[in-house]
Image (cartoon, helix red, strand yellow):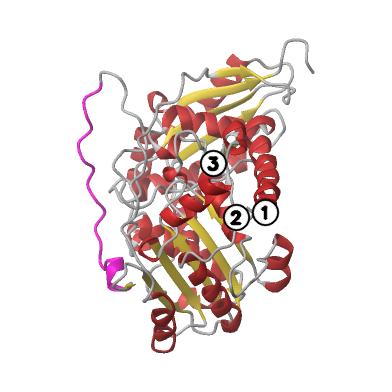
């Protein structure tokens, strides 16, 4: 909720307890062997405080920072949606963020959050987690912690007027991203086609099912997922463990904690046509979609570098309209963190170009890239850009100035820490990335972006439509 409009909906990693691969196994294919796990020089558990009720806390000071960032990751996302309530977790996020509690009687609307947290505050829902965050002074973040404590204590006050107001906002987001925006339509269809289980659901919501949500659904789902035993809290910036740990322990340590809830069974989607007509396109809009390896696998560092290199090459080489190829995960401010399960190569054609032309042009360009040699300069560029998203833990001296510079920079740090912990990305990923040779990146291009791994999907205009 409360996001600027993006060209595509944005999603993220399935978090704890993954029992299914992202990519579906092809029919008749032998089961894949369990991938080798990335080596770890220091487990995240060494840095996390875990209270008796299951509440987890990471406090990370940033020397020189004049603000702090506070991030509450609820370890449940749309993977907890009932099969007939797709979008319920997203709806709960809207309701919780605007809910009244004893310390904020009437709750805060979006405008209130913008007014009172000038350095940023928001919420988002992904496949395996829901995030509520704010940046500001210690006093402001402490106030938000007290509000969230009352949410976890079951004191959120939901009412009918709030439900209908947030339903209207939800339906606006859902229809925009699943019915109107071509890029949004294609990425949700690609997820449903290529990803198994919760990551493949239309987590933003389905309009008919969002319309059926009632207050009892909101209350029961909030009670099921928003409790102390199902939360990871990240505090970064102007913080200190000796001073802040007693505050958080006193605030959250006495709450009731339970085990994380079990996800409902996965229901396969109906057959998806790879090409459909759509009234909102004036020419063919096609995408090649490729599922990614899991983030804790040994293949992940080289894969990330290969994907980064493809994005850079697409940006540099294919700018003119009608020839533009765009490489991406799901567009977000920090897409490597918010949506790396699927890599997309997009191409908008012109009115004269057919669906076959768009597909062949994408395949031709990608085949040429797979045969390319990656030079030292381009490799170092990709390694440097990825360090921006995955800073080492603990932070090194050269990273401190960047994160201390502005309060908003703390958002990237808090998001990176939470996603890395929940997705089992090792603390030393920057070191692993820096040691990947060009030949391994080239091999990853050949393996993970092979034609038979991807699927082509497209939207085309209706006949006679311009």
Q: Where's residue 460, x and y in %?
A: 66, 19
Residue most toward the right? Answer: 466
Point out the image quarter for the C terminus: top right
* For the residues bearing labels 2 and 1, Cβ distance under 8 angstroms: yes
**Residue under numbered circle 2:** 95
Question: Which residue does the image show at 41% across and 53% down from the upper left?
Answer: 224
Q: Where's residue 238, x and y in %?
A: 52, 82
Residue most toward the top? Answer: 463
| Rendered position, 138 above or below 310 | below
Question: Residues in magenta?
Answer: 29-47
> Alpha-carbon neighbours of circle 2 within 10 Å: few (<14), some, or many (≥20)?
many
Q: Is residue 372 visible?
A: no
In terms of secondary structure, where does tag 3 sit?
A: loop
**Residue under numbered circle 1:** 162
Q: Is residue 251 visible?
A: yes
**Residue under numbered circle 3:** 87
Based on the picture, tell me whether residue 34 belongs to the magenta stretch: yes
Pick whichever, 153 or 456, lies toward us. 153
Question: Which residue does the image show at 36% across and 54% down from the upper left?
Answer: 423
In the rendering, which numbered label is found on residue 59?
A: none
Left or right: 47 as drawn, with respect to 32: right
Left or right: 465 as drawn, with respect to 232: right
| Rendered position, 177 above or below 408 | above
Quarter of the image where one finds residue 141: bottom right
Q: Looking at the image, is mark 3 or mark 1 nearer the viewer? A: 1
| Rendered position, 434 above or below 62 | above
- Would you say the magenta stretch is mainly helix, strand or loop? loop
């Amino acid at each position: 909720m409360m996001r600027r409009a993006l060209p595509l909906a944005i999603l993220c990693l399935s978090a704890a307890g993954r029992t299914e691969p992202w990519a579906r196994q092809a029919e008749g294919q032998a089961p894949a062997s369990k991938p080798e796990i990335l080596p770890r020089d220091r487990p995240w558990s060494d840095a996390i405080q875990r209270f008796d009720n299951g509440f987890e806390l990471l406090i990370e000071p940033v020397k020189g920072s004049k603000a702090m960032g506070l991030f509450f990751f609820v370890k449940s996302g749309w993977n907890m949606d009932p099969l007939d309530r797709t979008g319920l977790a997203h709806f709960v996020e809207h309701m919780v963020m605007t809910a009244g509690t004893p310390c904020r009687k009437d709750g805060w609307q979006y405008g209130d959050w913008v007014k009172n947290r000038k350095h940023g505050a928001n919420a988002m829902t992904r496949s395996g987690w829901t995030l509520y965050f704010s940046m500001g002074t210690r006093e402001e973040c402490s106030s938000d912690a007290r509000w969230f404590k009352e949410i976890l204590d079951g004191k959120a006050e939901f009412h009918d007027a709030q439900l209908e107001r947030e339903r209207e906002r939800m339906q606006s987001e859902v229809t925009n991203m699943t019915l109107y925006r071509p890029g949004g339509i294609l990425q949700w269809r690609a997820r449903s086609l290529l990803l198994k289980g919760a990551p493949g659901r239309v987590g933003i919501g389905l309009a008919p099912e969002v319309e059926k949500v009632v207050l009892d659904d909101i209350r029961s789902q909030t009670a099921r997922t928003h409790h102390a035993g199902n939360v990871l809290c990240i505090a970064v910036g102007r913080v200190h463990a000796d001073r802040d740990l007693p505050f958080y322990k006193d605030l959250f340590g006495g709450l009731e904690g339970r085990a994380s809830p079990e996800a409902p069974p996965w229901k396969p989607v109906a057959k998806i046509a790879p090409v459909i007509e759509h009234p909102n396109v004036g020419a063919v809009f096609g995408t090649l979609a490729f599922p990614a390896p899991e983030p804790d696998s040994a293949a992940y560092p080289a894969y990330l570098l290969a994907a980064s290199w493809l994005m850079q090459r697409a940006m540099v080489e294919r700018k003119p309209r009608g020839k533009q190829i765009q490489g991406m995960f799901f567009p977000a401010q920090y897409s490597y963190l918010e949506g790396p399960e699927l890599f997309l190569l997009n191409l908008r054609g012109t009115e004269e170009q057919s669906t076959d032309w768009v597909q062949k042009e994408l395949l031709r360009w990608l085949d040429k890239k797979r045969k390319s040699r990656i030079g030292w300069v381009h490799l170092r560029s990709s390694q440097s850009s990825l360090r921006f998203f995955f800073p080492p833990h603990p932070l090194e001296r050269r990273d401190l100035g960047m994160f201390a510079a502005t309060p908003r920079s703390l958002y990237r740090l808090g998001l990176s820490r939470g996603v890395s912990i929940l997705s089992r990305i090792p603390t030393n990923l920057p070191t692993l990335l820096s040691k990947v040779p060009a030949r391994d990146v080239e091999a990853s291009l050949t393996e993970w972006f092979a034609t038979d791994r991807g699927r082509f999907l497209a939207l085309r205009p209706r006949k006679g439509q311009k």
